[in-house]
């Protein structure tokens, strides 16, 4: 069994070679970028990176993904998704991601078929197996493969291999769909997404790196990586001004700090089971 990041990367490349042709669901994040680069290195023109854009994806991230693909010489194709037209997604149930991913994978399947690409691959890593991820159900229904999971690559492995390869994304902060900023049951709207996007863009411009602005009605709950919490507190006047300017009436800083999927902490055991 492979143990080092380099050995796991070799397994990843072997897995991709066995697939023969692959469409990579690409976002410009650390995981999908490494997958797209490995797939391009192994398969050449028998692979294509596809970037999906929507209201749930910040424009700055779209531009970054395009720029990264250009720098790395990836073959890139873009599609638009329209999650907000689906009332099931807008109502923000605990399996919200299932409806989003179903639309995405159906669209990617059509692109793959039109380009003669046999497989769709996503950038899920081994650490993703333990979280509430209803999108995995959609992936299974559409036959999406996860080569990095197959190779046993953790997030740390992905970052280390990306660093070794000199990829510009190796230390990129983790990102997630903007819909993940809203408690389950709170409607996802264009205005709400724009408010969160403006708030986070403003904080990013201050130099904060790993954080989330969780939207609880008129209250913004700021989660900041523990190592940056003191810095955020020192910037609190600017933080408050920025979040007020984005449209929030009240601003709080979460003392637990940033953690992935914090809004999943209130899910019941039944909700957890439904998401897997």
Image (tube, grey):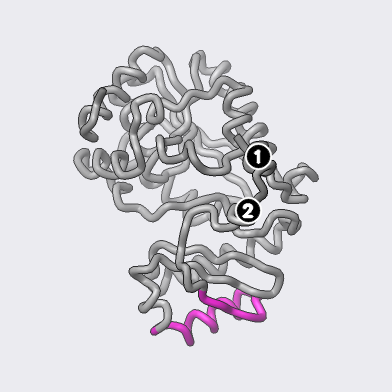
Q: Quadrant of residue 8?
A: top left
Helix, strand or loop status at disc 2: helix
Residue at 45% across, 27% down: 146
Labels 1 & 2 near each other (Cβ < 8 A): yes
Camera-side residue of 195 and 227? 227
Residue at 77% across, 50% down: 91
The numbered mark, 1 or 2, whose residue comes first in the sequence reads 1
Residue 27 lies, in percent from the top left, at: 47, 42
Residue 153 lies, in percent from the top left, at: 33, 34
Residue at 63% across, 42% down: 272
How would you rate the neighbour count of disc 1 (Cα within 10 Å): few for under 14, some for 14-19, many for 20 or more? many
Residue 105 lies, in percent from the top left, at: 60, 29
Q: Quadrant of residue 69?
A: top left
Camera-side residue of 131 and 235? 131
Q: As drawn, which residue projects farthest toward the front?
A: 269
Residues under labels 1 and 2: Cα distance?
10 Å
Examine the rendered structure and indicate whether residue 115 appears above or below residue 249.
above
Q: Which residue is mark 1?
A: 100
Examine the rendered structure and indicate whether residue 203 appears above or below residue 124.
below
Q: Which residue is mark 2?
A: 179
Segment tinted magenta in the rendering: 234-253
Check the picture and name the quadrant holding the C terminus: top right
The total number of labels drawn is 2
Q: As drawn, which residue projects farthest toward the right?
A: 87
Camera-side residue of 51 and 90? 90
Camera-side residue of 25 and 65? 25
Helix, strand or loop status at disc 1: helix
């Amino acid at each position: 069994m492979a143990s080092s990041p380099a050995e796991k990367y070799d397994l990843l490349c072997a897995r991709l070679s066995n697939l023969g042709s692959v469409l990579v669901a690409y976002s410009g994040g650390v995981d999908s970028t490494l997958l797209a680069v490995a797939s391009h290195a192994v398969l050449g023109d028998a692979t294509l990176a596809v970037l999906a854009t929507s209201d749930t994806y910040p424009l700055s991230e779209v531009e970054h993904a395009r720029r990264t693909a250009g720098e790395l010489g990836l073959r890139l194709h873009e599609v638009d998704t329209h999650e907000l037209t689906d009332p099931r997604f807008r109502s923000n149930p605990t399996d919200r991601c299932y409806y989003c991913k179903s639309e995405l994978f159906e669209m990617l399947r059509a692109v793959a078929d039109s380009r003669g690409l046999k497989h769709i691959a996503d950038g899920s890593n081994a650490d993703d197996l333990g979280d509430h991820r209803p999108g995995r159900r959609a992936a299974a229904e559409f036959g999406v493969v996860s080569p990095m999971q197959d190779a046993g690559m953790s997030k740390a492995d992905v970052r280390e291999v990306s660093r070794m390869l000199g990829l510009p994304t190796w230390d990129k902060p983790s990102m997630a769909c903007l819909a993940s900023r809203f408690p389950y049951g709170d409607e996802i709207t264009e205005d709400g997404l724009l408010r969160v996007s403006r708030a986070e863009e403003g904080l990013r411009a201050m130099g904060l790196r790993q954080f989330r602005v969780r939207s609880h009605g008129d209250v913004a709950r700021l989660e900041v990586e523990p190592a940056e919490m003191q810095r955020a507190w020192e910037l609190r006047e600017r933080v408050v001004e920025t979040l007020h300017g984005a449209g929030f009436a009240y601003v709080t800083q979460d003392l637990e700090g940033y953690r992935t999927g914090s809004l999943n902490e209130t899910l019941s055991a039944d909700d957890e089971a439904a998401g897997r």
